[in-house]
Amino acid sequence: MIKFFSKKRSLKFSSKITLIDTFSDYRFKKDDLVYPGLEEALNKKSNSKFYFVPNFFPSKNIFNVIRNIFFFSKKNYIFKENFLSFFNYISCVRKTLSKKLKNNSAKFNNVNLSAIINEELNSNKHFYSEFLARVNLAFVEKLKEQNLDVKKVINRFENQPMDKAWNYGFRLHFPSAEVIGFQGFFYYPHFPHQSPTSYEQKAKVVPKKIIVTGKAFKK
């Protein structure tokens, strides 16, 4: 597996660290649009150990994607890709392509919905979204293997599959960590899934605390 250029392929800090997920596309960006000004503010804290974890979207403009990778590698960024092996990615693909309900028993009001659910599971129309979710889980597992002391993680929270995997992974493997979801804007098609249910909270696939435009709501 080709590794992204970075001196931070292995984190060996005794002090507690904070991890912040963010996004990058083909556009060459020097300023983070997800958390504007956050990196500068955190850099002013001498005792702050924080790292952004970027998600890269597929693009035909490979040149700018590579420029972004090299630019981020000189800043407080770590890449999930540097922690995962080729076999980790193969495993993520295999698990994404092979899904089926256990025992074919999914009933609601005595109606068996297993056939409908299995059809949806096997459609693979949302392959990339689920694949990224499994990559997030594998990444958190690798961090756990390094025995890191993770103090806090921040998720740009839309309650998408990759968000669920990020939050579930850290709540499972780092139960003492502060898991925060950040919603800096509202986009009306996202309204249904941006409001977590009690079932999602019980399953630990949502953050422990969600911050919406500067106001915190504990779940």
Image (spheres, grey):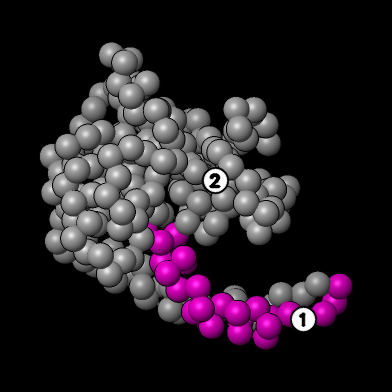
The residue to which callout 2 is attached is 157
Choose mark 1 or mark 2, whichever is in front: 2
Majority secondary structure of magenta residues: helix
Q: What residue is at 66 percent from the left and 59 percent from the top? A: 189
Q: Could you say where residue 186 lies in the image, as x and y percent from the top left?
A: 63, 46
Q: Quadrant of residue 32?
A: top left
The answer to whether residue 202 is seen in the rendering is: no
Q: What residue do we see at 42% from left, 69% from top? A: 128
Mark 1 or mark 2, which has the lower sequence index? 1
Q: Secondary structure at mark 2?
A: loop
Question: Which three-letter amino acid code belongs to the residue tagged 1?
Answer: Asn
Please indicate whether residue 17 sits to the left or right of residue 124 in the image.
left
Asked which quadrant contains residue 111, the reply is: bottom right
Where disc 1 sits, the SS reads: strand
Residue 122 lies in the magenta stretch: yes
Q: Is 117 situated left or right of 1 in this image?
A: right
Q: Position of residue 85 (x, y in %)?
A: 21, 60
- Near mark 2 (Cα within 10 A), the count class, few <14, some 14-19 or many ≥20, is many
Q: Position of residue 166 (x, y in %)?
A: 46, 49
Q: Which residues are magenta?
A: 109-135
The answer to which image quadrant residue 210 occupies is top right
**Residue ID for mark 1:** 112
Q: Is residue 157 left or right of residue 83?
A: right
Q: Residue furthest right?
A: 109
- Judge whether 131 appears above or below 174 on screen: below
At x 16%, y 47%, the residue is: 70
Name above or below for residue 98 compared with residue 27: below
Q: Nearer the viewer, residue 104 or 60?
A: 60
